[in-house]
Image: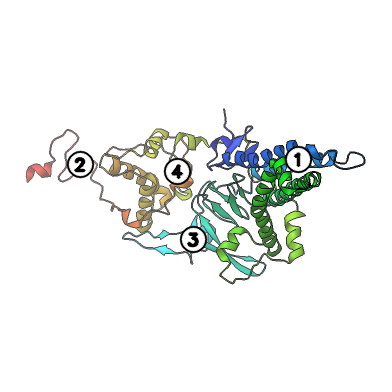
Amino acid sequence: MAKRVYQVWKGSNKFFLCGRLIFGPDVRSLVVTVFLIVVPVVIFCEFVARNLLHRFSGYNSGYAILVVTIVYTFYVLAVLMLTSARDPGIVPRAPHPPEPEDVMDSANSPVEWGGGQTPRLRLPRTKDMMVNGVVVKVKYCDTCMLYRPPRCSHCSICNNCVERFDHHCPWVGQCIGQRNYRFFFMFVSSSTVLCIYVFAMSALYIKFLKDDHRSVWHALKHSPASVVLMAYTFVAVWFVGGLTLFHLYLISTNQTTYENFRYRCDNKVNPYNEGIINNFNAIFCTKIKSSQNKFRAKVQEDASTQMGVIHQTAEIRDVVGDLPAKMSVDLEAGRKAAIGDEFDPEREACEELHNRKSNGHDPAVDIKDGYEDAFTRAIGQPLSLEGTDTRIRSHPRKSSWGRRSENWEIMPDLPAPALGDRTLPGNKDMTGKAGSEDKAS
């Protein structure tokens, strides 16, 4: 049975409800955040709001205080879940690294020459992109094997590249990115309003008690819950209120927290700033992009990947054909050849192809013999490719770009012995006896 994407997810995220909800690895901190919201509200409703029901004349308007508190608390929890339980804008990982010719011109690509004849091309670490007339450098992510889009960064906690990465918030247990930044701001701003509301209603109840007892001290002794709530909300409003003001500044200048802390001393022009009105419109009035990940979709696994087959480059695969599947599985598992060196059919085939091209041979005619020679030298046994019909496909992670050329020990072609001569100098024939030349010596 095919697995689903969330079951084979390579990030550090936690999934619930069969992949419908996605959280960060520190999702347990979300329980603490909910506790810090719900418990003070319950205390407020029980010891303050209930005593204010009949403090206002006409139509029992005191009930409105209790209703507003409950409804607004559910709203805060809702935007908290929308922030924490959704895809923040994760960029899907590439199945294989980009080849150098896919990202830049080979004439300008960086080349390193080793001791051999084959150069090693390196992927550039950055690329230049134009954003509103300003050149912006995007970096290559080794984990996700892709060039990150502008304003994208890799979160070390969630182990994902996130579009318009702002920061990873431990209080919500999730990265804050392009798809949940709006809800994150709504959460911190609504939490600020809730703190101010609870503080104001608690202070109002203390005032009513003071009017009844004609002493502030007696009023405070009569309702210690109000005192605790006022102290709690006073401290909390400095955190969530300060965070709200800071993000209002970031939105007005179209920055992220990551960009502000990293580039604030560079005095660079912000290519994303389009004015206060357009900046706020981009955050609150534009449609949220759909997720690039289908977490509940079934994974279509390649049969060759499941078998562990070693792949070839396109040029060699089109000319040579196929190798036995069992031998490919053994080689992929990392078995050593009899001569003590790790066998790599792709490397050996490339060497044979290079030698035959340099000698003027047609690779389409001689490449099959080159494969037989490569296997014979490596494992000491002849290989027959006749009648094989097992397909070998190109595995992206087995590319030869990253190999050092000094490890490519190209062996020259040896002159073939006569058909009747079954021995070479210094070797033994098939019967185990020394060759004629050795006997003569």
Kindly report which numbered mark, 4 or 1, lies closer to the viewer in this rendering. Answer: 1
Rounded to the nearest angstrom, the CA distance separating label 4 from label 3 is 26 Å
Label annotation for residue 421: 2
Q: Amino acid at mark 2?
A: Asp
Instruction: Name the residue carrying label 1.
Output: 48
Q: Amino acid at mark 3?
A: Arg
Rounded to the nearest angstrom, the CA distance separating label 2 from label 1 is 106 Å
The residue drawn where x is 69% and y is 52% is 185
- The image shows residue 441 at horizontal and vertical percentages of 7, 46
Left of 185 or right of it: where is 346? left
> Would residue 92 be visible to someone looking at this image?
yes
Instruction: Name the residue carrying label 3.
Output: 125
Callout 1 secondary element: loop
Task: Name which quarter of the figure residue 360 lies in.
Answer: bottom left
Q: Is residue 4 positioned above or below 236 on the image?
A: above
- Earlier in the chain: of badge 1 and badge 3, it is 1
- Earlier in the chain: of badge 2 and badge 4, it is 4
